Image (tube, rainbow, N blue to C red):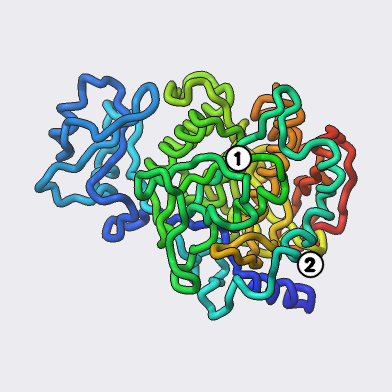
Amino acid sequence: MCEADRKRLTSAIIAIFVIGLSFIPAKAQANCEAVAGQVIVDLLNQNDRVAIAAQYGLDPTPIDQVGSPPSLRMRIATGNTQTPCQIQTAMQGDARIVKSEVNRKLSAVERPGLPWTQGLSWAAGLSWAAGSSSKGYAKQWFPYTIRLNQAHQINRGTRVDNGQPIKVAVLDTGIDPDHPAFAGRLVPGFDFVANDNDPREEGVLRQDPVYGHGTHVAGIIALTAPEAKIMPIRVLDKNGEGELWRIVAAIVWAANNGADVVNISFGYNSDPLLLKNLLENCDTPPPGIQTFPELNNNQLIIVSAAGNGGNNLPIYPAGNRINPQLGVGASTRMENLAIFTTINRDDETRFIRAVAPGENIVSALPGGRYGLWSGTSMASPVAAGVAALIKAQFPAMTPHSVVDQIAETGIRWDCDHPTRGPIKTNRVDAFCALTGNMTCGSNPSACSR
């Protein structure tokens, strides 16, 4: 390892290396990482529901449903000892079933040995709350790098057509609503964990490994788009655990409560088709896929963290190239590719279309604190804030157009990484994004290590 790599790795450890929240799918039937007692099924013919329920040991009456044709959340019948994963596997090949999924259970800690954590965790005895302040928050490095001050001369998050603020929904662990960084900045959100109107973070500093994550992410958006409003939506509990169905419900809720942008600083390492179909519907969906009348034709710009694997293995939903979604990797203060970021090679299926600052980012933490974190979880809200500025300046832009404008106007990175291969992406530049400058500049040294 060269000296530059050693310094970057040390910096990442001190900053508390995170991906938002990493989700672990059920790879073994004996360890079915899914909500117990539930499966999600789409039927070719709804008249087959009772017969299918009888065959697979399900309650014939769905818990609830979403989409059209509907995805049914079905309860495993009392006395059926099979896991959801076993039932879902058994359903493969049944011509009456269009698709089946488990209601994926999430794992929220950066466990050593997982490919997107590189074996690093804040729990290594280092505090992510140390050494920062409100001054450090306001004067940190990344706003200068993305030319945020120049962008703010054009727009700060207020729509030019009606004077209303853009709303950015933060789907995460909740928020500390009393933090000074959010004074006058919040709109009502929702807690999908406790099922109430108080999406406040729960946990204990240095005891719960994800405590403060949602607050930190929201603080980055507050700095990047200072006149936008933040809609806190808690989808993960204090252990960082959640479920697919809850996230789907939260996105629908955000759409129907005025959100323009949704930030997703978490991911699955397998592809949940229900979530993919929903995100496709956040703009004009391609023909032939499941639709979601529950969105009521409301459109959303989706910004998702790429993952922290230091490789090209996709983390979902960022791993899907979907028109209204921007998958975001991480860049460093030295304008290099972060050693931890997930990014795929240059080809026509490139799903990580932009990178943004994600190393040693100062932001809010619960209890009025400020602290450093590193990860693509921090890069994603930088891009989400820029998306809010674009939408405010160009209110008629579709989500697809906003995503394209961010991805096509940044500092061009087109280089051959010594270990990652050909990399082609753009580092987000707020000023060029707002001015539509497609020749913003290039950085041929981005792949240097």
Give me the C-alpha separation between circle 2 and circle 1.
35 Å
Q: Name the mark on residue 294.
A: none
Place of residue 95 in the rendered image (x, y in percent of width and height, measured from the top left): 28, 27
Which of 367 and 209 lies nearest the eye of the viewer?
367
Which of 32 and 141 lies nearest the eye of the viewer?
141
- Residue type at mark 1: give it: Val
Disc 1 crowd rating (10 Å Cα; few below 14, some 14-19, many 20+) is many
- Residue type at mark 2: give it: Arg
Q: Which residue is mark 1?
A: 168
Q: Name the mark on residue 449.
A: 2
Element carrying mark 1:
strand
Q: Is residue 83 left or right of residue 155?
A: left
The C terminus - image quarter: bottom right
Place of residue 367 in the rendered image (x, y in percent of width and height, measured from the top left): 55, 65
Disc 2 crowd rating (10 Å Cα; few below 14, some 14-19, many 20+) is some
Which of 181 and 171 lies nearest the eye of the viewer?
181
Q: Residue at x 69, y 63 (%)?
A: 362
426 in relation to 9, above or below: above
Counting residues from the start of the chain, the first of labels 2 and 1 encountered is 1
Q: Is residue 191 left or right of residue 332?
A: left
142 in relation to 272, above or below: below
Q: Residue at x 29, y 26 (%)?
A: 43
Are the residues at dot 2 and dot 1 in contact (C-beta closer than 8 Å)?
A: no
Which of 383 and 49 lies nearest the eye of the viewer?
383
